[in-house]
Amino acid sequence: MKTHNQSRRDFLSQCALLSASGLASPFSAYGSAGLTSAMSAASPPSEYRAMVCVYLIGGNDLNMLVPTNTDNYNLYSALRGPLAIPEEDGIHPSCPGMKTLYDEANLAFVTNTGALIEPTTAHSYNTKSVQLPPKIFSHNSQKDFVQAGLPFQGEKLNGWAGRIADMFKASGSNAPLNLSFNGDNVWQRGAQTTAYGLQGSSVSTLFDYRTNGLPLDTVRKSALRSINQLQSDHLLTAEYGRIMQGSLDLSDKLREGLKVQEIDIQTVFPSTRTGQLFRNTAGAINARNGMQMPQQNFYIFLGGWDQHDGLLSRHRSTLSELDAGLLAFYRALQEMGLENQVTTFTNHDFGRTLKSNGDGSDHAWGGHQLVMGGAIDGGNVFGQHPIFSSDDSQFEERRGALVPSTSTDQFSATIAQWFGDFSESQLLEIFPNLANFNDKTMNLFL
Amino acid sequence: MLSEQAKSLKHGIFSFLIPLSLILSACDGAGGESSDRGTPVKLISAEEAQRFLTKSTFGATPSEIERLRTLGYEAWIDEQFSIPQTEVLTITDTAVQKREVARRQRLMSEGESNPDVLARGIGKGQEAASRMDAWWHAAINGKDQLRQRMAFALSQIFVVSDSNGDSSLRNRAYSRYHDILAENALGNYRQLIEDVTINPAMATFLSLRGSIRFGFSEVTGLPDENYAREALQLFSIGLVELNLDGTAKLANGREIETYDQELIGNFARVYTGWQVPTGRLYDGYETDELQPWGGEPNSFHDYDSKLLFDNKLLAADLTTRMDLSEAMDSIFHHPNVAPFISRQLIQRFVTSNPDPAYVERVATVFNDNGEGVRGDLFAVIKAILLDSDSLNSHSDKNGGKLKEPLLRISQIWRAFNAESVINYIRFSIPDRFTGQRPIGAPSVFNFYEPTYAPSGAIEDAGLVAPEFSLMSDGLNIAYLNKLAQIARSTEFGDQNTVYTTNSTLAMKLDLSKAKQLSNNHDELMDYYNELLFGGLMSQELRSIVITYLENIPGQTDASSQSEMIAEEALVLLTASPEFSIQR
């Protein structure tokens, strides 16, 4: 089901016309899938594929997309007051890279997605007649919710990329799948698997420092291994040793492989932190064979999006850094010939209020995401477009919050299905909340 | 800024908290050999003292171990209360001046003579390094160890960060913020939250500064909710209603959320109309406090009535400051504060998984220190450290915590009396090796969350271990390498570069005692066991290290032989899980 398929010029122009999206569906019974049992087995796809999750901690302000339809722009502008930006191409002016990729049909946007347990409207939210994600508007609670994709009924905290890794593992695959530039994270955490935490462009090793011809460095590493593997009846002591030795072993396994670059990447990446994270991601993709990773998922964590004040200038700066990184990353993927096999997408805690608090926006709910890749039906805006008025069943007027019209789980499940060729029942196992929605996925992919 | 309530507290009112065995052995809480009743029943052993100091300071030293054994636990804590505070801001300013002098000297030696160039400041990177110099100096060399350790713990609850904040805020503001936490660390929580709320660094980080009432102009929307929300979620009561023992209250099997959007909106209205009184905040910290914006009446403040906790109505037309004071009281008297703060402090000092009864004992003291005073943090930390669950924590198989990486490193520096060529401990970018930088967490959610559990046996047991959140694979290896470098720092590095690099090379450990024992590996292990492990080193660890030492080929030079033995043992021991975990 594709809700909209527009040319760039018509960007968001149909907002006012939008009434019934196919995503709006009657409430169904609360899902209560038994998550305590292990995930079923699923074979990895036969070709290389990768997902790159760019997590914008704090929540991306809605200004990434601006309505181009005049009526909608006027509603937007009146609501946002000092936070409104001029109408141009619908895409924030500091994102020329996104615009280029959108025009090339390699990038699409998904509007008004957010954490939902079941279909929700402003009315059902205000009248408390709907089951809501717990502790809504709290950063960490919503981050956990969107990364986990679970109903949060007491189960262990793990994420949908982690559960996918569990399913591959259950089918006999021993290859590591998840790589993180921010250590342990909910998204990549499974019941049986965890992400490998990369530090930079290479995997370091224990330094040798006895240069006077002694074989001590080797002996010391072996002694450290014995120390880490000592049996201990003290829980934290035993777990520290297990985790530390796991890091040493996996680093040894990945270190040499990461040096095996398939091609000499020519793309120049920005020198910003974001640019370097994308560069290092490209480097690890370029070394997929050396690292013996038939599939990869990357977690990139970008800070600075909690823009309660100074929003206009701060959002320009964070968006611009993201934008330049994305463009360089896509060009590098094209160099490798992998642009159809790697899908990059944003996620965040929540969208932010439309109404200004003076010079910033506060925690809200529905927000916009982007998805980038050759497999994407790019140059489109998907999802139900916000109208920004009391006529809109998804608009909560008092704080100017959007009630999500598409659940993050529907967005995530779409990408997951592309990645793993999952059946609907497998998707429901990964995303139990989907049972409450008629449409399990969106038509983001060609 | 110590509250009068806290200052008036005297010694000796806490004996009801002390386990019976300790009272019997320690004679009226004084403990040790100073008792005027003559021979004490039982001395605190060096190992017990080491373990107590591992919890309560930045690391046990031989002299502090002796001091504690002489005074006894409670008297040692009381003594700490009266030690003057180490001022991190003052040290920061001195460190900046030293760097400026060093910069001028270097430029002049390179032939620079332009007075404008020579007079230029050192730049933000070097200012940040100066702030770190000062923080480490207080942590390693400050006599007020308990106060500084508590300030560090509070900085991880009342989080301000130099990352992701307003990049124009100067480093002096962060040093001053640390000092304000230290001033209140053994004072009262009520004063602490007010000082923190209108502190310029906090008010910039969480954007309370300059928040404007609804309707101030046509375009002004609802006031900024940032501080209103985070102060409730993270600094005071948390997201769900708690029992006194820190467990969640349940209604029909579900947790009960502590507030809704309506309440956040009301608190956000309270916090409107605060601004820095002078324009040059970023060059320093001209003030510790924001002021009502333009005085009273304050056109930026919302003077309408507000509904706070328990439906308490805050009357209309109170001044900006009275509104704030009432809101602080409303938070302060919420029943969640005691268990919420007590449990997190126990996690910082003693164990990741306190028994609910332990939390309840501490929270009870938080609510009433025995003299009717609520929020007495000195009484709280005393209750935490003197509780039998703390004094006996090493025997709990599921107890203890992963030491914070900065505390593992500070412990080594203190144990071996680290010296620096520049008088300061130098470790300017510790986050690159540990994931931790004081007043530099990735966000207001600190370096780790109190509920974090790594997957594996800890999560399977239903337990948490927040500090494990920093054990990212690549970081683990960077940490081990840095640790090995620190343990082998028995000589100063290149002294000419200490002001231009941010390395740890400017420091050296005193391993003379270990070198003396290097011919007898058993005695060497005994020495390290007492000083670093509080006597808890396992036989298995000892024998692996001894086997390793026995295989080190003999050196022709006796001095380098003893140095190599002392260093190699220390490298392996400090990397071990047994050293890393505080039991």
Image: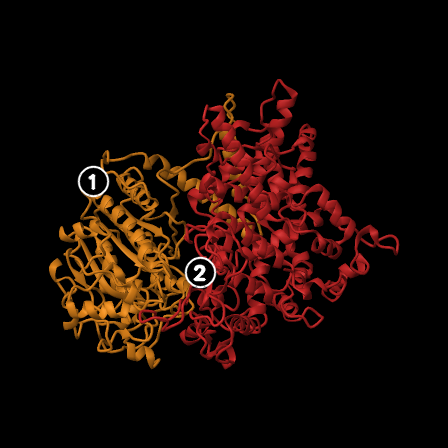
Chain colours: A orange, B red
A443 vs B151, nearest the viewer: B151
Quarter of the image with the N terminus of chain B is bottom right
In the image, residue B320 above or below residue B34 = below
Residue identified by numbered label 1: A336
B220 vs A168, nearest the viewer: B220
Whole-percent x and y of residue B525? Answer: 66, 37
Distance from Cα at disc 2 to Cα at disc 1: 43 Å
Whole-percent x and y of residue A189? Answer: 38, 55
Residue identified by numbered label 2: B206
B209 vs A428, nearest the viewer: B209
Q: What element carries label 2?
A: loop
Res A267 label = none
Residue A77: quarter of image: bottom left
Residue B218: quarter of image: bottom left
Labelled pair 2, 1 in contact (Cβ < 8 Å): no
- Looking at numbered disc 1 in the image, what kind of residue is underneath it? Met
Q: Residue at x 79, y 51 (%)?
A: B43
Q: How crowded is mark 1: few (under 14 residues within 10 Å), some or many (20 or more)?
A: some
Q: Which residue is drawn at 39% across and 51% down?
A: A194
Label 1 resides on the chain identified as A
- Looking at numbered disc 2 in the image, what kind of residue is underneath it? Leu
Is label 2 or label 1 in front? Answer: 2
